[in-house]
Amino acid sequence: MVRKFFTLLLVGLFCFSCNLSFSSEEKAKDELYRELDLLGEALSIVSKKYVEEKPLKDLIYGAIEGVASSLDSYSQFLKPEDYKELLVETEGKFGGLGIEITIRDGLLTVVSPLEDTPAFKAGLRAGDIIVKINGEITKGITLNEAVKRLRGQPGTQVKLTVLKEKTKQIEEVTITRDIIKIQDIKRALILEDGIAYLKLSEFRENTAKELDQALKDLEKKGMEALILDLRNNPGGLLVSAVEVASRFLPKEKVIVSTKSRNAETLVYKSLSSSSKYLDIPMVVLINRGSASGSEIVAAALRENKRAILIGEKSFGKASVQSVLPLSDGSALRITTAKYYTPEGKSIHQNGVEPDIVVTKEVSDQPEQEDVFERIKEERSKEFDYKKDYQLVRAIDLVKGLLVLSHKE
C-alpha cells in the first residue's frame, strides 16, 4: 500500500515536471525521487514492524506535519478538520479566548490579544509566553495543537500559566471561553476639536468598505484630523491592508512589496484614492500587538510621509502565508514570501519603530469580572479616552499638526 502510494505520487510529480526545462529542474527532480524513496522505505518499515498497527493515513499526515514543522514557526499542515476550523475564523465568529498566537523560538507566544475578549480582559498581552495549558507544558507543541487546546465550547474554562513579557514573572490565569465576534472597526468617533479616532481591529474582506462608511460619517461630524489606532491589530488579509492604506495615499504610491524564494518581487501600490482624505493631519498608534497587515499600513503611511507613528515597536511578523488545499480536504499553510516596506526595509523579526515612543498605555492589570459586567450595562456612557495615555499623547500631537496646517 505504501509503495503504491509513492508510485502514484512519483507519477504525479513526473507529469508535473514535464512542463519544466530539462536542466537544473531535472537534477532537482532526480534528487526528489531519491529522497521520496527514502521516505517510502521508512514508512514501509513502520507500517510492517511497528509494535502497533497504524493507519497509513496517519503515517502520511505525520510525515507531512514533519515537513511543515521543519520550515518556520508560521508554516503548518492542516488536517481536514483543522482546515475547516481555519475557514470558520474568516467568518468572524468562533469560540475561544480571542488571541493570535505563534511559535517563536520554540515558545508558544501571544502575537496579539483582540480587545474586549476573554484573553484581553484576563491581562494577556503581545509577547507573553504561554508556558502551560491546563497544567500541560507547551514546550514542543505545534501551533495546531495549541489552537485546539485553547478553543472550546463557550462557558468552559482553560487554565494558563503565562510568562509575562514586561515583568518576566510567571502568572496563572483561568479564562472562560466565549464566542469571539470580530469587529473590523471597533470604534469611530470625534474626540474633541475635530479630531477623529478610528480603531481598526483586523484586516478582512470587507474592512475597506466599512472604513469608507466610517470616514464618511466622521466627515459629516466635522473631522479635521485622524488618529488611526492599529494597536493589538494582528493583521489579516494583505489585499485588505493595501486597500486601507490606499484610502490615505495618492495613486501609485508603493505600499508594500513581497519577495519570494525565486527572487520574484511583487509591488503593491495604492489604488485610486479619494482626495478628501489625502491632506488631513494623521497619526497612527501602534504597539507590541500590531503585526503583519497593521505593520504594513503603519510603515507605508510613515515612509510615504503621510502619517506620524506613535506608541511602541510593533511585533515583527511580516511574512506571507499561503493556504494551499490538498486533494483530501487537508491543506498546507506555508510561508511563500516576506514583506518589505516602501523603502525596502524588512519588517519580519524587526518590527516597525514609532516616530515617537510612548510606552505607557491603559493599565495592563486585569479587571474583575463584575466590573466588566457593569461596563456592559453602562454602554451608553461616553468612551473615556483620557485614561489612555498613548491616545492622549496622540491627541496632543494632532493638535500641534492642526495648528501648523492652519498656518499654511
Image: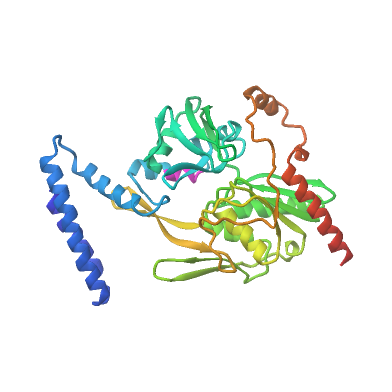
Q: Main secondary structure of the magenta part?
A: helix
| Residue placed most toward the observer, 290 or 325 | 290
Q: Quadrant of the C terminus?
A: bottom right
Answer with left or right where residue 399 lies relative to residue 85. Answer: right
Q: Residue at x 25, y 69 (%)?
A: 28
Q: Is residue 123 visible?
A: yes
Front residue of 182/119: it is 119
Q: Residue at x 61, y 67 (%)?
A: 271
- Number of dots carrying numbers: 0
Residue 257: horizontal and vertical position, in percent? 53, 66
User: Measured along the vertical axis of the image, is residue 336 above or below residue 70?
Assistant: below
Residue at 63%, 70% in the rendered image: 253
Q: Nearer the viewer, residue 288 or 18?
A: 288
Left or right: 11, with 288 as reference point: left
Q: Magenta stretch containing residue 133, yes or no?
A: no
Residue 133 placement (x, y as % from top left): 44, 31
| Residue 189 in view here | no
Residue farthest toward the left in the current orientation of the protein:
48
User: In the image, what residue occupies the spot 13% across and 35% down?
Assistant: 51
Name the residue at the top extreme. 370
Q: Which residues are magenta?
A: 86-91
Q: How is the image coloured?
A: rainbow
**Is 60 placed above or below 156 here?**
below
Q: Where does residue 25 sit, x and y in percent of width and height?
A: 26, 72
